[in-house]
Amino acid sequence: MSREEVFEKLNEVFRDVFDDEEITVTDATTADDIEDWDSLEHINLLAAVEQEFGMKFNMGQVVSMKNVGEMADIIIGQIG
Amino acid sequence: MRELEYPFDGELILKKSKRLRRALLEERSDFLEKRIAVLGGSTTHDIIRILELFLLEQGIRPVFYESEYAQYWQDVMFDNPELVSFAPDLIFIHTSNRNITTWPAVSDKTEEVEALLAEQFAHFQAMWEKIAEVYRCPVIQNNFEYPFYRLLGNQEGVYPQGRISFINSLNEKFYQYAREHGNFYIHDINYLSASYGLDRWADPLYWHMYKYACCMQAVPVFAHNLANIIKSVFGRNKKALVLDLDNTLWGGVVGDDGPENLEIGQETPMGQAYSEFQGYVKAQKDIGVMLTVNSKNEHDNALAGLHHPEGVIKPEDFVLIKANWEPKSENINAIARELNILPDALVFVDDNPAEREIVGAQSTGTAVPEIGTPEQYIRVLDHSGFFEVTSLSEDDRKRNEMYQANMARKVQQERFADYREYLLSLEMHGTIRSFEAVYMARIAQLTNKSNQFNLTTRRFTQAQIESFAADSEYITRYGKLEDRFGDNGVVSVVIGRKGTLADTDIYRRGEIPDASDSAASGADVLHLELWLMSCRVLKRDMEYAMMDSVVEACRECGIGTIMGYYYPTAKNAMVKAFYQTMGFERTEETDTGVTIWRYEIPADYENKNTVISVKSTSKDVPS
């Protein structure tokens, strides 16, 4: 899966989870950029991303992930 | 909504919860609002988020109170004006084995383990007792799930020091408490986690990262199971199964294959699966579920299939058998009518997706589960929780008999030209008295599930019912009816409150006076806060007998006026003119359709009921 395809799918997940069709994420997107993205929604978001890509984040990755770009890197690293 | 019916896609629900919530709120407007306090020993945010969806699906609109993280015990035990003013209709305590603080060590002696067990139980018991005293509302309490590792391996449940042994003992103490206390219900996460898969359920990542007691993906299963208890407590259980026959209760088509060639019994794997399913269905009778048949068949063929010698379920197990060539959706409406229940109290079980589709498209609220293949039928019906048991009353166990007796009465009725003569032939005996301890649970149950013959549709918990019974401001009456065909149990409830004519203003708004408003003296009016009757005794003159009893109670404490109120709902049109029938005069109709009725008790009041012999009622009226 190309990085573009990963971002396309991520956009869909973000739009579903935050119920906002306007969202477009980039490498630099963080929780500060999306109003409803708080620590509780974060859990739900990660679960939805895991389901979409059929992969799992481990604890170390969840703790260190800084932005959507790093999230995409982990996804690509796991699904190849 | 299909997305929320078992078997559901939990991950889809988690992901699209906001959209689903919006759609549910748009779907209907007649929600029953309930205030639910969620007191957690772990994070509860997503449990509340998803629980709301499953409750909306059941027609219950929750307002939540959420404890601060892991403050479940403190929230109850210490002064908590916020929770007191929230006035919960129900408290859910979300604890898990992560909240057990007194685990035994392997080196502990058996007596020491016993002491730890007692200490841990006392922690919970103190909290439940405080709730019973302060909040007096139903409580739902998680039991404990098994830990995800076993220090003592396979002997973890054998040695008392093992955590599995400890949890089993603790759970047993919880169950014992539940058996001894009404209004206290166990949410069985021990079963749920096993059914879900303990390793996935207990994924420690969710505890360490977010302080979740179970993994995120298990939250929908959890919330669905919990919502089933809540809707059952608030009277939203289904009441009857409507069953197809061919390829649902047996393999094959009886009309084509002949009864001797049906797959049922121990001869073939498929026959075994159908036998097990028939046994499951038959056992539903014992928890008060009514069984009916809705099949496209000649009636005789249907009976021949049900008389199959290997069959578990027999024609007499059903209260109604509709085997004909009418559309199944019409049979369903007829079944609802004949049982005097609404179509939304039915569950339609049919292997044929096309039939399910047609019935589902009627949108009458009849549940139409996707039952899968024969070996899956039991799991789908069972996990759907349509008939979630929260109290096992004698009435529940006897409901099928009662409805069968009703059918016998109908036959009887056809033999009489004169209706009164028919009523007399039933040899009816009523018992009408102030609320009594043995019937509190049934009375509370009735207030929560009666929709049609219900003037005010006020819902009460058992604790509230008990408090009315103890309060001299109230006149309470329950009515029980027996006849030659059987005992109908408690079928009618009236709650009246003493006051003055000025209180009418409060009732007009659909409210009830505060305790402090109640007239200590000079009460000369009875305001009827509740009048309901089970539809199973319609047209038996029971309402007249209730009226006689209420009038008698009024006269004994010097009350000369009775005020009745009709609050319209989507379901109670049948009693719109009820008070008129009872001889009340309509004094007012508001722009919201509320009607207010007044009855001046005449000095020469004559009993309206002349067909039921009623056991004396008067001595226990509080005054």
Image: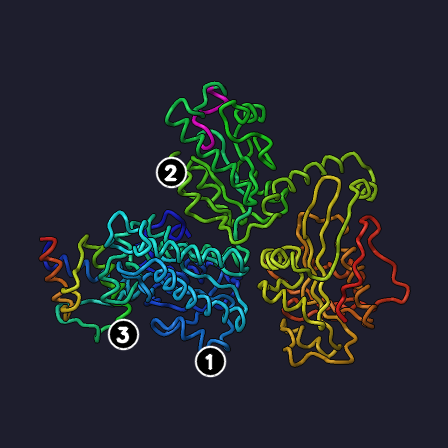
* Distance of label 2 from label 3 (alpha carbons): 44 Å
Amino acid residing under circle 3: Glu
Q: In this view, does A35 lie to the left or right of B32?
A: left
Q: Callout 3: residue from which chain?
A: A
Residue marked by disc 3: A35
Q: Is mark 2 on a helix, strand or loop?
A: helix
Q: How far across and down, in percent of the image, does residue B509 sit?
A: 64, 74
Q: In this view, does B589 lie above or below B543?
A: below
1 or 2: mark nearer the eye = 1
Residue marked by disc 2: B376
In this view, the residue in front, B483 or B406, is B483
Q: Callout 2: residue from which chain?
A: B
Query: Do residues under tags 2 and 3 come within 8 Å of each other at their CB atoms?
Result: no
In magenta, the rendered stretch is B248-257
Residue marked by disc 1: B79
- Crowding near the residue tagged with mark 3, few <14, some 14–19, many ≥20 C-alpha atoms within 10 Å: few
| Magenta stretch: helix, strand or loop mostly | loop
